[in-house]
Amino acid sequence: MAEETIVYPEPMSSYIQRFRNKVLDTDPLKNILNDYQLEFTDPQIAGWITEAWYMINEAEPRTNYRLERFPKTALLLDGAMMVMLEARGLLHLRNQLSYSDAGFSVNLDDKAGHYAQWLAQKATLFYQELKQFKRSQVPKFFSVGSPMRFW
């Protein structure tokens, strides 16, 4: 089955390239164990970026940023990486196979734990950054006016 080529408009195409740079998925020749192909497809990366965008906008206080004018793209890409780590961890967990016989053990696709560790680290940093970002978006609070000041 041939993969259909999708051309993404800006800024999604830039986000996809920046994500690839961030996870070092820019040169298929360096992916020896992946049959010299890129690890991720553009639609996968676009999906993770979109999920991160939803996640950031839906966190309290809710915002309504568009992808075209997202104020903190590094946060968006970190969120996409977090979504990717979760997805890849679940995939590897589903496909994990352990076998042992007479002292001989084989573990196939035993990477779920590694993804979980990376996810925990990335999630901690992501949610700290998200909290700071959301705080910066709240209108500044100066004081509560008192009706007594008019007397």
Image: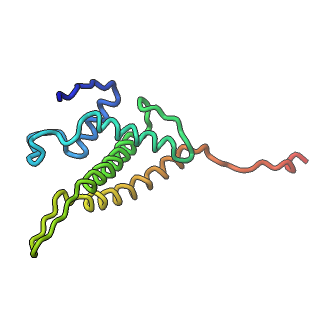
**Image position of 82 (left or right of 143):** left
Residue 114 vs residue 121, the one in the foreground: 114
**Percent position (x, y) of residue 75?**
39, 45
Q: List the single residue furthest toward the bottom.
A: 103
Give the residue drawn at x 46%, y 31%.
Answer: 66
Q: Quadrant of residue 72?
A: top left
**Percent position (x, y) of residue 30?**
10, 44
Q: List the single residue furthest toward the front.
A: 101
Q: Is residue 29 above or below residue 1?
A: below
**Percent position (x, y) of residue 59?**
51, 46
Give the residue drawn at x 12%, y 69%.
Answer: 105
Q: Quadrant of residue 3?
A: top left
**Percent position (x, y) of residue 12?**
33, 31
- The quadrant of the picture occupied by the N terminus is top left
Q: Quadrant of residue 6?
A: top left
Q: List the single residue furthest toward the right.
A: 151
Residue 97 vs residue 84, the one in the foreground: 97
**Image position of 56 (left or right of 47):** right
Give the residue drawn at x 8%, y 47%.
Answer: 32
Q: Is residue 56 above or below residue 9?
A: below
